[in-house]
Image (cartoon, coloured by chain):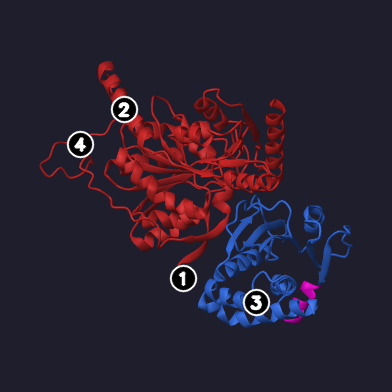
Amino acid sequence: MLKQLILAGFGGQGVLSMGQILAQSGMVEGKEVTWIPSYGPEMRGGTANCAVTVSTSPINSPLVAEPDILVAMSLPSLEKFEPTVKPGGWVFVNSSLIKVEVKRKDIKVCQVPANELADELGEVRTANMVMLGAILATEQIVSTATVLEALKKVLPSSKHHLISLNAQALQAGANVVG
Amino acid sequence: MSKVLMKGNEAIGEAAIAAGCRYFFGYPITPQSELPEYLARRFPEVGGVYLQAESEVAAINMVYGAAATGARVLTSSSSPGISLKQEGISYAAGSELPCLIVNIMRGGPGLGGIQPAQSDYFQATKGGGHGDYKVIVLAPASVQELADMVGTGFDLADKYRNPAMILGDGFLGQMMEPVDFEGIKKSEIAEKTWAVGCKKGRERNVHTSLYLDPEELEKHNIKLAQKYELIAENETMAQEYLTEDAEIVVVAYGLVARICKAAVEKARAEGIRAGVFRPITLWPFPQKVLRKATAAARGVLAVEMSMGQMVEDVRLYLEGRLPVRFYGRAGGMAPTTQAVYEEIKKISLECRGVE
């Protein structure tokens, strides 16, 4: 198994964290993982993205030119990365913010109203976890149980009360896929 | 939990602590700032001294002072900052003071950009500052290797009383990978009888790079040159991948070698016998291993994130025996697996055309 993802959105939407949690979870499951962020004069509201690779064998290049999965949390990220997705790959579209259609016909599309679902949970900042829930329900990269275990490891104990909220967000995303 | 997911820059910091380093002098610059940030937080916990100097020039001279007292000392920066440190590195080499310098390279020349590059190869391996001297240069390719090579760098610096450098790029510094600190080699720091400090009745120790008498300076130059010969003889490191039967050998260092490995696997799947030769020490360059690794080759391709620097050494050490092509991206752009694969294919066709 080798899955390469690009997760992209506005700064502040939690795309870098989403990637880190995925990489962390892959590591917990004993898989090989790499995480590379875009870096530059970044700011809240600007664009941010990261590339994540999860594999069952050692990873050669951690750079992702042709992702199996693209997560577009905002319109500029969809426009920028849609052309790069591997034919037959997936694009997860945050349909709360993206009102245009995916142009390519050779990739699969999953529409996730991530902001709305996160709002329903009372915390719009869980939109990234809603999205992650949808991804993991579609492609078995890691199990959601591992994600929750990984959260326990990376979050300080003062934040552990948020884990159940994150579990709900993952579930809300998974429900979109059905 | 034996493995932790960490940024390359942070892993260097933790590895420095594991290697017994307790002194850091530096100045922030993208893309290596997580390293000083990490040590600013961690050093006070382990009784270390973290000091953000007023400039890179000040920082490297603080390194000189700490090294003279026998301390295991680290500094780090990125390309433009490393240029500023060159005077101090030359002085440390001249005074034979061990220290570890980390360069997480970004694009140049001048201020250049802040994205990853490998365009400081010449500066790192050919001296960098003024005078006849060499710095031991290590080029890791993963976050684990970044951590492993911190101890190696300190040990080599101590063993030969010479500055050592870890040459990485912005990708390596910024990326996260699992890293295991429990398994990294523990170093025994030998007593440094040459260090300045409390004399306790012994002869006074002096460290200087100033030799006004030309005869004395020449003697010193010869002594240094002999030391460099010894290092070149004993301390080269390289990694080979599928080179035994390779008709095309791709030469690359650091993260780029991993991109080339992926390209070579793609070429192999198409029946092209390709391999990767990766120098781990850039100085001393593993020239003997390179010649051995290219014994079956008909063509060599050097790949770098620069306009072509290491390729000059590859040509030098192959002594015209084989055609050496170059493929590079610069300014913060990285070669893709596909592009390297296509270069390999081109050379393969050319080689067959000769038959």
Residue type at mark 3? Answer: Thr
Which SS type dominates the magenta stretch?
Answer: helix
Residue underneath mark 1: B1
**Answer yes or no: do the residues labelled 2 and 4 have beta carbons within 8 Å?**
no
Rendering coords of residue B274 (x, y %): 62, 41
Name the side, left or right, on which B266 lies relative to B228. right
Residue type at mark 2? Answer: Gln
Residue type at mark 4? Answer: Asn
Q: Mark 4 falls on what kind of element?
A: loop
- Among the 4 quarters of the image, the one containing residue B113: top right
Q: Colour of chain B?
A: red
Magenta stretch, residue numbers: A113-121
Q: CA distance from mark 3 to mark 2?
A: 60 Å
Q: CA distance from mark 4 to mark 1?
A: 46 Å
Q: Is residue A26 above or below residue B336?
A: below
Label 4 crowd bin: few (<14), some (14–19), many (20+), radius 10 Å: some
Residue underneath mark 2: B226
Q: Which chain does the numbered disc 3 sit on?
A: A
Rendering coords of residue B96 (x, y %): 31, 34
- Magenta segment includes B151: no
Residue underneath mark 3: A144
